Amino acid sequence: MGWRGALALLLAGLFVSGLSGAFAYFLPAALVAYAQTGQGTQGRSGARAGPSPNSTPNTTPVPAGAPFTVLLLGSDDDSKFQSDAVLTQSMILVRITPATRHVTMLSIPRDLLVPLSSGGEAKIDAAYSYGGAADAVTTVERNFGVHVDDWVWVGLRGLVKLIDYVGGVDVTTTNPVLDDFYPADLENADPYSYKRVLVLPGPQHLDGLHAMEYVRSRHGDIQEDFGRSQRQQQVLLALKAKARSVNPLDLPGVLGSFNGEFKTSINLADIGRIRSLLSLASQINDPSQIQQLVLVPPYTSDAVVDGADVLIADWTAIRALIRQYFS
Amino acid sequence: MIPGRWTAPRAVALAAFAVAWLAAGLGVYLALGAHRSPVATKAPRPDQVQATAGPLRRLPGTLYLVQDGTLYRLQRGTFTPLLNASGSATWTMPAVSPSGQDLVVVRREYAYSDLYLVDAAGNVQQQLTHDASSTVEGNHWALYPRLSADGSTLWFDYDPKDVYNSYNVVMAVWSMPLGPNKTSQMRKWTIPNDYTGGDVQPVPLASGGMIYTKYALDTTANKILGQLWLSKRAGSEGTPLTPASDDCSQPALSPDGQRLAMICTGGTQLVSIQVATFDGTTLGPRQVLVSGQVAAQPTWAPDGQSLVYLAAQGISGHFQLWQQKLPPQPSPSAAAPTSTPIPTRTAAEASPSPTPTPLPAPVQLTTNLDFDATSTIAWHV
């Protein structure tokens, strides 16, 4: 083999090595994308799989540029619960209209009493624990009369790590959040232990742990779960603002940071769609483009059913709201 | 590279190729990693960044700021750590005495905080409160210390326990004589609203009263919003200085006591820094200095001619120090106080001053630090 052959061998080897380096870089993201994203819609209860009465199957891909709706699910997934049978304390419907760059966020109260798609009646946060994301999606679709295109589930530690990975979020906290009985389940083996929490009011840079305390604390809020829902929406919007500075090379780190506390129906291996979603997020900067909704009275009212505090929905009013913002 | 033709030079060449291939693979891996977004870059310590020239060096007097739980002194462009964060303990919210010789600083642990009197060199002189408890809910917070004009009275926030409902943890404004073992003389000044976070950020007045931020549920907006209140005696209800819907907080009184700076959000995530004249009872029209930013902690210069504040900057979102110079104070006739708070709906719509002197552009004083925006700034000549 002459020098030309040697040069060709060197260049070919460099090319293959470079590809191997890139493959190694993206491998963790690929594994997570394979294992935890692009998930189907079959619930454990078996109730899901077919379309809800008011919707088309959500396996239908969303046409490029068309409005779409995502159901965000957040869970306390500490050791109080069996793995993957957790409640979803946070349920937020997000409607995104790419053409107008308009976003609507509707927080669903966790105590809302609804018929579950898996059967029976319970608080809506139980839908995920009985049947996974699929049953949560179907329950929301059937009760709210809305079509959900995709869903995203994040566990407690996943959100903390995600926020830390992006360097924290800037939030103008609404008021002092004080809680003497905040769960200390993230840093303590006893899931029933508690700690004191204080989040100071005003503009500030929150790391993952303190952002979690801000969105999770509920004992000291006069609006109880409604106040917590407003805080969750604030932090989500702050995270969205961070999307402007994230690029596809961050995917391995972002997905790795979740460490299994993240699932979605969105196929994260579809780099083209991920890039377009990040681009869309970066274009939504005007606060007037973002509508934040919380189902306070008269959309809901307090009640006690079988000894449990629940919220009763005024479905006529809620569905009118859905038609206005999610159709 | 046929085995039959294996020679030493060829073996060396192959080894060199292998090294090059390994380096290429590793290089691509590292290069991809190096091009991740730098959002999580940690800021350097302020004392590692010295200003050799520029506006930071020209700031008069001494400022005290907090980054990462460490209290820094800023003099002539140089940051010096005075009280270092240690373990879970952090220092925050410095308040300087009228003489400038002492500071009252909060030392915060994960479940409680205490006030300490320290000298200007950062040496702890006295522990003023004792809020630690062996039971989680038995701990207390002591925050936002301020000293009276004569330096004899300490104002601060404290969370008394609700004996009827342990979930109702709210802060109220208290006062006590400055000194060790004075907590038995603590006096509660305000009656906070339940489940709102309470009353915070007292600013004592020379007249004996104080301005503070009260949080309350605005049933129109369905949000808890901040409102500046004036209390002239302990236990009195006081009077509001700003409309609830403006969501104003972080009051800062000018050295002459005639102007009040504050931040207002109108219930949004963005902030405007505003200044209004203050006649001891009511606020005059407000002038918007900065708007549409995530900004906090307006703090008057000792000469009252400018304000510094913290504002989030760049993709990291770290808070930097900014300075806004102010026009001369409007004449009393031009800034006649109104008998009721101005009916501004949102911060952005706040009424301009009747003498709309153009403001110079604010000046960014630091570029890559990471100040704690929840900590007050102290500034003494």
Image: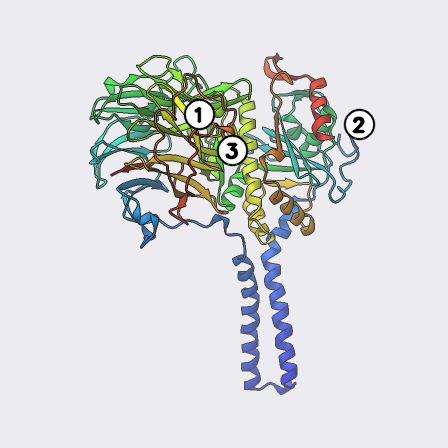
Spatial CA span between label 1 and label 2: 42 Å
Report which residue position mark 3 lands on.
Answer: B269
In the rendered structure, the answer to whether residue A94 lies left or right of residue B9 reads right
Give how far across and how far down residue B362 sits, in percent.
41, 43
Q: Of residues A157 and A222, which is closer to you in this image?
A: A222
For label 3, the SS is loop
Q: Which chain's residue wears label 1?
A: A
Q: Tell me the kind of residue under disc 1.
A: Asp
Q: Of residues B168 and B71, which is closer to you in this image?
A: B71
What residue is rendered at 26% in x and 23% in y?
Answer: B206
Q: Dot 1, crowdedness within 10 Å: few (<14), some or many (≥20)?
A: many
Asked which quadrant contains residue B177, the reply is: top left
Q: Tell me the kind of residue under disc 3.
A: Gln
In the rendered structure, the answer to whether residue B227 lies left or right of residue A256 reads left
Report which residue position mark 1 lands on.
Answer: A179
Mark whose residue sits in front, 1 or 3: 3
Q: Of residues B8 and B72, which is closer to you in this image?
A: B72
Q: Do marks 2 and 3 share a chain?
A: no
Q: Which chain's residue wears label 2?
A: A
Give how far across and how far down residue A201 sits, in percent.
43, 29
